[in-house]
Amino acid sequence: MKSLSIFLGLDGDGTVVHEANCRPGAHAGVLLAGPEKFVSFLELHLGLQRPQVHAMDRILKLKALLTELPNNKLPFKASWKTDSIGVSRRIIELWDSWRMSGWNPEADRTDLPQRMQQIVNIEQQIISAGAGLPDRIHAILKELKQSILPDTSIELIDPLEFLPPLFKQLVNNLPSNILITEKQITPQAKPGTDLYLLQQSFEKDKQLKALKGDNSLFILQFPDDMAAANAVHAMQEIGKWQPLIVNQDHGLLHGLKLSAKRPVGHWRPGSGTGEISQLFFLATAMFR
């Protein structure tokens, strides 16, 4: 039985490249996954059942729970009056990021910074709002000791040392039948290869933030929506690239049919907060 194949990276929550969309020799049936997708993959194969809690549902539930608290126990009190949803979102983001960095709220609760202590004081409300990615990883780490995973080949897009400590711990504790390698990516492809053509097409405007690939599967990262939209047009001009759009926020494939400006379907790669959008293209060579 052929082993499963995964490209795993911090920004890789995405889709599956199907054999029908790849030229001969390309990576068929490869899962492009980030932490969220990879954790879901492990939960599926370990038989871990969990309530499906959407990120916004978790935020709204925390908001409702915090509304019941006395005013003097609310963190971010000044902001709460004008943006209770934003405060709830920020609390969850901080809580999850601290735990992904390796902080254990059960063991390390003394001499905390004031803001951190305020959030620790509402720990029960945060937990009641639903499981976050760190909770799911901890559940997987426990289950790995007594369960079996299918043979899987994992190529790390990001170096292991770049992964958040808790996610790195998960990768390091995978069983021996999971083959893990770091993807070797040539910064400048050899002239005449597909990857070289792709690099050259974006060299003039310098809008490409990052390009990773091995001459059959390519991940393109752009600094903003406009650069990504321009890339769609450029790829169509080359004529032999079929971009697959992946929305980082939800990890959804939005369609294969593309216009020069926008792909078919809803496209919201950024959060609208002014942060750099990260939109990825899976580009498979299409020879006609």
Image (cartoon, helix red, strand yellow):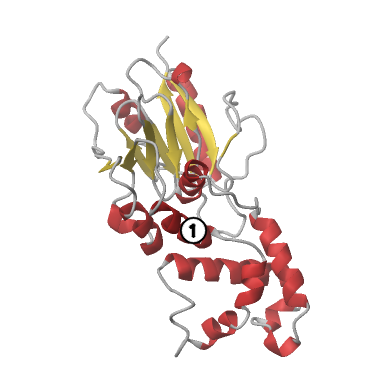
Position of 105 with respect to 28 (left or right) is right
Question: Relative to residue 83, is residue 168 drawn left or right?
Answer: left
Give the percent coordinates (x, y) of residue 221. Answer: 43, 43
* Residue drawn at (37%, 44%) of the image: 210
Check disc 1: other Cα within 10 Å, few if <14, some if 14-19, many if 20+: few
Percent position (x, y) of residue 287?
40, 12
Depth check, front residue: 28 or 77: 28
**Residue 229 in view of the camera:** no
Nearer to the camera, 239 or 38: 38
Q: Which residue is mark 1?
A: 139
Amino acid on which the number 1 mark rests in the picture: Ala
Give the residue drawn at x 29%, y 51%.
Answer: 159
Quarter of the view holding residue 129 = bottom right
SS at circle 1: helix
Front one among 75 and 186: 75
- The picture places residue 67, in percent across and down from the top left corner, at 77, 76
The residue that appears at 34% across and 44% down in the rendered structure is 157
